[in-house]
Image: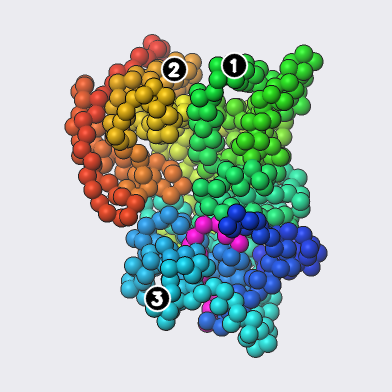
Amino acid sequence: MAALVEGIEGLRSVPALLRRNATEFAGAPAYREKEYGIWQSWTWAEAEAEIEAFALGLLNLGVAPGDYVAVIGRNRPTLYWAMVAAQMCGAVPVPLYQDAVAEEMEYVLSHCGARFVVVADQEQVDKVIEVQESLHQFEHMIYVDPRGLRKYDHTRLHDYAHVQDQGRAARDELIGELDRRRGALGYDDTCVMLYTSGTTGKPKGVVLSNRNIIEAARSSAEFDHLKRDDEVLAYLPMAWVGDFIFSIGQAYWKGFCVNCPESAETLQTDLKEIGPTYYFAPPRVFETLLTRIMIRMEDASPLKKRMFDRYMAHARKVGPRILDGKSVGPLDRLRYRLGEVLVYGPLKDSMGFSKVRVGYTAGEAIGPEIFDFYRSLGINLKQLYGQTEASVFITVQPDGEVRSDTVGVPAPGVEIRIAENGEVFYRSPGTFVEYYKNPESTASTKDPEGWVATGDAGFFEEATGHLRIIDRAKDVGQMASGALFAPKYVENKLKFYPNILEAVVFGAGRDRCCAFINIDLSAVGNWAERNNIAYASYQELAQHPQVIETVRAHVEEVNASVAEDEMLSGCQIHRFLILHKELDADDGEMTRTRKVKRKIISEKYDDLVTALYDGSDSIYTETEVTYEDGRKGRIKATLKVVDAKVVPVTPKAMAAE
């Protein structure tokens, strides 16, 4: 127990881990960043020097223990260094989503009372300036990229490099104070504050301690046998707990290298060049990659298409078994090895996954077909179930026990119990301290014994001990017939099709299920181009008769699949419409992590939901949208409401409570 109180081997904070790495792994690569097409690298010793210089610069600007330092921008070593430098000073880093609009940033900056803000570039500077008058505690902003900022008022605006230079110049004067603060950091002191995505209201500030982050990083790294020479690509939002635990928690615990891509546009190229051995992505990334693959195969020659289909069919049959070390006949193994040379290997290389030893997906449920596709290629993709409040890890999948329909067993050190209503509860060393300035939500989420309510419904399989998550507890309900309603289950099946980007299923308390569909513009646009079909907008393409018929076929295939599940057979989709716009976080329809806000969507598009259920063949609608430059506009459209075939079944009703 002493180790838990004082920190493992005396490593009680992220800065303490940095000190160890800079001493023991001084010459090993810690960070890489691609800029102007060239990879730049920093060793652990060099990274510590950069971080210490910035920490001294922050002290010079007046950062005090307990201050909140906001960090906004894409994944860059300088911004990761800013977070660790803030910790060195006894301050708390608060990363924000870089694609958030000014009003969203205003809420977080005001709520946490950030005195200091570190941003990547002019775009983020402009957002903060737009709302700074309402930020009463705001004092200084520091930017990394100086382009476009020369003529700005620099009274409270500072160049990152200049802050470092000032820190180096004042080193003799300030190093004693920095060492005192760094040495005073305790295991139960705050490490980071991360804001939830806010699917049901305002985002909440999740306070995570050094204990939370280090214990979660240590146990998960040991579980998956992570190594010091592993490579990760840091490209997910820095405000997301997944990026923090992988790019700071585990990276600092094990001492492996964090690679930052040049931009979102070069991500795929940079991924191929780095060839990460440890990779994490939410389902949306894997869905998008699969869509690109299918588009490419549609454009391939008939010979290549036949070869791809033939070997992928074999891969689906034996690939996961080979990956899990199970028995497979010699002829099947030989054919799979041939497929590795002709199809699987080149495909993995093109995606940048040729060296992946451990891959994870989480954040949303992934469609079983998508999950199995990647594992059939020999990619060790696994699911984990987690939350910001858990420092990510609640359940994990052990090697050899990976399945698409479960999320694995309790992660090391995690206890799980299922309430009578099916809601999943957990407690662990990674359990968050509190919601900042929100004791009511803290008390309703975490009880005095440390049990946290996840808000998800699930159950343990008796035979395997694996947890199965059905859906969000608030989304799981009953249909009018008493049949189980679990929309995410159906939505994930729909999103397996490259033509479908997003789906929202309705049916709670109703006699049948209906759905909104978003088409994938890249996939459907590629089909239109191949078939010489002209279109002027997303809206026009979405209502094209052939597109509607294609989506109808997908819906009916999903209905046939859903009908096979006795519990969920009532969730077949009877009617659907294709929306006239993509669901968008800027319009409040999704979170920044691209989770659907069901309540907002059902209220905003109440006229469309009504049309799905009242027998209408079409519906005229007008919708306000937000453009990239912040301007508002309106889209007008007449949408076709489409009937889909369902398979006659008698769905199993939910047990009476």
Examine the rendered structure and indicate whether residue 485 appears above or below residue 434: above
Q: Which residue is mark 3?
A: 151
Tell me which residue sits at (40%, 27%) in the image.
529
Give the numbered dot on residue 318: none
Q: What span is in magenta?
A: 62-77
Mark 2–mark 1 CB contact (< 8 Å): no
Q: Which residue is mark 1?
A: 303
Tell me which residue sits at (66%, 84%) in the image.
171
Q: Give x and y (percent) for residue 495.
A: 46, 30
Residue 131 left/right relative to 212: left
- 321 part of magenta stretch: no
Give neighbour class at mark 3: few <14, some 14-19, many 20+ (Cα, 10 Å): few
Examine the rendered structure and indicate whether residue 548 appears above or below residue 34: above
Q: Amino acid at mark 3?
A: Lys
Evaluate whether residue 144 shows in this view.
yes
Q: CA distance from mark 2 to mark 1?
A: 27 Å
Q: CA distance from mark 2 to mark 3?
A: 59 Å
Disc with the residue nearer the chain's start (3 vs 1): 3
- Nearest the camera: 400 or 522? 522
Q: Which residue is mark 2?
A: 557
Tell me the colour scheme of the image.
rainbow
Q: Give x and y (percent) for residue 582.
A: 35, 39
Residue 652 left/right relative to 175: left
Disc with the residue nearer the chain's start (2 vs 1): 1
Instruction: Label 3, secondary structure: give it.
Output: loop
Q: Residue furthest top?
A: 648
Give neighbour class at mark 2: few <14, some 14-19, many 20+ (Cα, 10 Å): some
Residue 233 left/right relative to 629: right
Q: Give x and y (percent) for residue 260.
A: 60, 54
